[in-house]
Image (spheres, grey):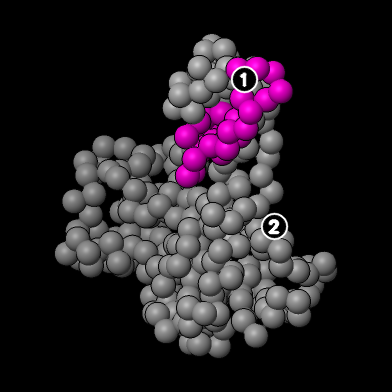
Amino acid sequence: MLRIAVPNKGTLSAPAAQMLRDAGYRQRTDLKDLVCRDEDNNVEFFYLRPRDIATYVASGDLDLGITGRDLLVDSGVPAQEMLDLGFGGATFRWAAPIGGLDSESQIGGKRIATAYPGVVGRYLAEHDLKADVVRLDGAVENAVRLGVADLIADVVETGTTLRQAGLVTLGEPLLRSSAILIGRPSSAEAKLSQLMRRLQGVLVARGYVMLAYDVRADLLDQATALTPGIESPTVSPLHREGWVAVQSMVRRADVHRVMDELYEIGARAILVTDIANCRL
């Protein structure tokens, strides 16, 4: 039985459980439950603190886990990213007092406050920089004002909290994080293939819609140039002479532009349908 760790709380918990449901797996119905067995799919889910998941997977006690890329990097354990799940995005940036530092190249020798010392440590090692890392559990924005650090490294969303603390972002992000599926280099591919196919099917379904429309046969080449699909569009003759029906997968982000352009060239009865899941 495949053993998979799922975040038990926090911002990754509900989206991770929903994605697994969308992929056809049973999930807990009571948030107090620590384990959920899906006998039909031969999978057992364990609900753990997001920060602990990488450790359990790396040790071999669990086969796979869903956690954040930031938490995997911060743990420093030998687990590997297998699939980006497309939710839980976060950007880690440096922040320093206004007028303090000009670029991230100047952080060498400084005191850096962060709740993610592993993330900062990896960046310093990769860029051959030495600095004092001060680990804090939260509210790192106050570290500079209180004299604990010279700058901070933290998740930045709008930057409002930073500005209130008299800080500004510095240079490029040191990490872009999102929810990921993690495993070990030794994980058996046969055990993972079904899960990977299902999750990839959910990702594609969330990123695409099915677009159907009618168009004159003499305009088909123009229309299908706008809707090439994943492999090729489906084209069927209509009862109306000289017209065809077309079905094609289109990126969700592009669908309104594509619909407008199809209408302009003469396509009609343009319909959009959500895709619940798929296998490509």
Q: Secondary structure at mark 2?
A: helix
Give the left or right position of residue 218, taking residue 125 as reference.
right
Q: Marks 1 and 2, Cα distance to the nearest angstrom?
A: 37 Å
Q: Is residue 159 magenta?
A: no
Q: Position of residue 18 (x, y in %)?
A: 70, 57
- Check if mark 1's residue and mark 2's residue have beta carbons within 8 Å: no
**Which of the two discs, 1 and 2, labels the residue nearer the N terminus?**
2
Q: Residue, x 24% and y 49% (percent of image)? A: 104
- Quadrant where the N terminus sits is bottom right
The part of the image, by quadrant, that contains residue 202 is bottom right
Q: Residue, x 82% and y 67% (percent of image)? A: 29
Q: Is residue 251 magenta?
A: yes
Q: Which residue is mark 2?
A: 22
Bounds of the magenta segment: 226-255
- Quadrant where the C terminus sits is bottom right
Q: Is residue 56 above or below residue 120?
A: below
